[in-house]
Amino acid sequence: MKNKTEIFPLAFGTGRLPEIELHKKKIPDQDVIDQMIQYAVDNGINYFDTAPLYCNSQCEQAVGRALHSFRDCIYLGGKLSADDIKTDHCREALMKTLKNLQTDYLDYYLFWGINQYFFDEVIVKKKVLDQMRIFQQEGLIHKIAFSFHGDANGLSYIIDEAQKRGVKFDACLMQYNLLDRSNEKSMAYSHSLGVKTMIMGPAAGGRLAIPSDLFKKVHNTNVSSTYELALRFVLSNPNADIVLSGMSNMNMVKENIKIAKSSEILNWKKVKEALAEIESFRELYCTGCKYCQPCPAEIQIQDIFKCYTIFRVYDLASYAKGAYERYKKAGGKTFQDCLMCGQCEKKCPQGLSIRKWLKKVDDIMNEIQDSFCFSEHEHEEIF
């Protein structure tokens, strides 16, 4: 612990680590992951956010291998899933995570993806807050936290109710970006209480990473892309202590670090004036979190919705059509294959009417006449 410094504002989200195919199965590309994490640590990043189900349930092992030699100078965050809480497997889950990450303790342990209802009806009733305190007393975890998916008012409620029960949350992880500022007041509230505010989804699930001229309309200083604007927007909020970015390649690691180290101050007035224009982007807000997976019909819902983002948000109809056709050509399932079971909608943190949107996107893509094929490189950059 003595070698650790303050947490760098930009954190490494490990939910989108690069993968390779081996024996028809996707596994983490360990060599590339090692290089990415080495570069990140060498250039200041010292918080790494993990979860047991990321990367086909192989994220923790990959991160544990990559970070083992850096453990004394970095912070590790892990997550306790709702299923493990419901089935009273909290200790087993924590011990498995520690083993996978090759560590004796976690700096932050988060209740994963909770809302007010789950807090009241499961965490409180099962006395899991007490269990977390025991883990803390045993030295297995240092800080108690939670990641939040729900109505913004619920976030403040959870913090206050836990405090009444003798547990002060040390941090909370919430969604916040140019497209979704619903948690802005909650950020300020948690920050004012000394609860470290962690932000996820600064690029809105990739929607703000797609090449566009939007940044020219929003910002009048030296910002070179909409993605840069999006990341700076979140980093510049005084109530955002740590900003998590899911990084999937070395270029992204380097670009994010460069942006995070920039000292340029945003013109907040101009940014906020442009938010009215951005409001229209919210029509279909899929973050690409893949909580809807696996789909019984094997529909890659997040990939289809990305095609719609390209079409609707950035007015790139031919580009979107090309992406959709490529998805289908690779064997991707569409609305035509949907079993209408509704399992995806029950699991979606955003509460999307997924079946309705799958049909709508399919109809729109089929109506677009002009399409073109783009290169492998371009495909990777978008997705």
Image (cartoon, rainbow, N blue to C red):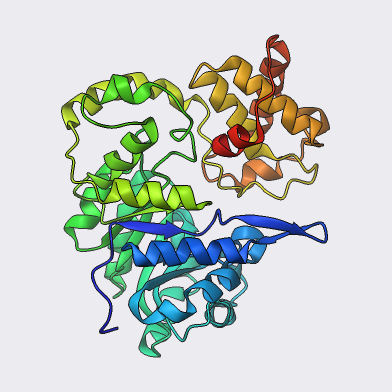
Viewed as shown, does residue 128 lie left or right of 22?
Answer: left
Q: Position of residue 348 (x, y in %)?
A: 58, 44
Of residue 156 and residue 333, the one placed in the foreground of this image is 333
Corner quadrant of residue 340: top right
Of residue 312 and residue 253, the one placed in the foreground of this image is 253
Would residue 356 be visible to someone looking at this image?
no
Viewed as shown, does residue 255 lie left or right of 308?
Answer: left
Quadrant where the N terminus is found in the figure:
bottom left
Q: Residue furthest bottom?
A: 138
Q: Position of residue 203 (x, y in %)?
A: 42, 40
The residue at the point 82 percent across, 36 percent down is 331
Above or below — where is 204 with respect to 257? above
Of residue 299 and residue 134, the one placed in the foreground of this image is 299
Above or below — where is 136 with respect to 199? below
Quadrant where the C terminus is found in the figure:
top right
The residue at the point 47 percent across, 55 percent down is 117
Q: Position of residue 132 (x, y in %)?
A: 42, 78
The residue at the point 63 percent across, 45 percent down is 346
Corner quadrant of residue 339: top right
Corner quadrant of residue 138: bottom left
Q: Position of residue 265 (x, y in %)?
A: 17, 39
Of residue 351 and residue 374, the one placed in the foreground of this image is 374
Would residue 266 be visible to someone looking at this image?
yes
* Number of numbered markers: 0
